[in-house]
Image (tube, rainbow, N blue to C red):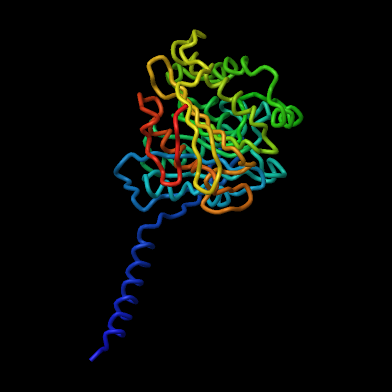
Amino acid sequence: MLSQSKYIAILLALLSILLVRSNSASAGEWVRGTASSASGSRNYALWVPAAYDKHKATPLVMMLHGCMQTPEDLAAISGMNAVADRHNFLVVYPEQTAAANPLKCWNWFDPKNQTRGSGEPALLAAIVDKVQSSNNINPKKIYVAGISAGGAMAVVMSATYPDLFSGVGASAGLAFKSATSVESGLAAMKQGTPNPQQLGLLAYTAMNDGLRVRPKKLLPLIVFQGGADPYVNPLNADQLLIQWAGVNDYLDDGKANQSVKMETAETFEGNIHGGYSYTRSIYKNRAGRLVMEKWIVKGLAHAWSGSPAAGAFADPKGPNASEEMWRFFEQAGKRVNAAAKKKYPETREKSQ
């Protein structure tokens, strides 16, 4: 007859086996692919959550990595796959090549990559099309986000393919056409662009290029920016918001009539326990619908905020950018009480 201690040991062993099986069964999976356009081809890595049902239309988030990164690097530093597992959406990570840029940066500053149907925008749109062709994707819930050069390229994609994306997230990103060369790109990173007010019309003009119908009435934007970023001046976050306020002002009715203003509807000060403090600003249109958010994380350098672990371009001491971006994508365009958003245990906020 088994002793009580051996019996308990056997039960614990069986329980551990069941837990391992349960965890492996609930994990998502990677699917690799390649998409092509007239501009060439790019590889991508697609994360498919375990709860994905091919019979149900599912959201898709495109994540664009920064310089010297791979899709796997961005997946690791952002933790977006875990967010996808919790909320059941797919995540696609395109991969830039060293042949296109020695540092594997997306060439957001190159004029040929700032136009619909050409260059890298065409390649990235082809990846979305490829993922849509082999999965059941909700066309009204496709979003794009990225960090650094990837954040700037996410903005380019939303300007050149507004019919494809329903929202954009930029971490340490820059405004569309804030630069048109390598030299001006470096200058914009350090000191912004001299005429941010003019950029709204440039983006709106690009949005209408090649489209038979006028773009969406709103194109929501969420920005994360480190207050201590040594590479991208935090001024760029404000300039990106200025541009997108202009974009959404035009998108409302085709006129510059201040329907969306660069004025915060609500501002919150918060802090992460044992981490950074931050300022979260909310922007709405005249109808009270959420259009833009800006998060300035004090003390954060050039890194993804709220990463699962510390590392290169990863900092766990800030608010969880991946969770907040997904929450914003789900709420954007709606009349929401920003103060009533889901609170994460590590986050404390107070309205200003």
Residue 190 in the image: x percent, y percent? Answer: 72, 31
Q: Position of residue 167 (x, y in %)?
A: 46, 30
Closer to the camera in the image, 316 or 203: 316
Q: Does 57 sit above or below residue 46? A: above
Quadrant location of the N terminus?
bottom left
Horizontal and vertical percent for residue 126?
Answer: 51, 36
Compared across the picture, whether 258 is left or right of 152 comes to left
Q: Residue furthest bottom?
A: 1
Foreground pick, 339 / 217: 339
Instruction: Judge left or right: residue 337 versus residue 223.
Output: left
Number of dots carrying numbers: 0
Q: Is residue 264 above or below residue 46?
A: above
Q: Residue at x 32, y 69 (%)?
A: 18
Pick the front one: 158 or 148: 148
Asked if residue 229 is positioned above or below residue 53 in the image, the reply reads above
Question: Which residue appears at 31% of the width and 80% of the height?
Answer: 10
Query: Where does residue 101 sit, x and y in percent of width and height?
Result: 70, 41
Give me the residue at 59% from left, 48% from top. Answer: 314
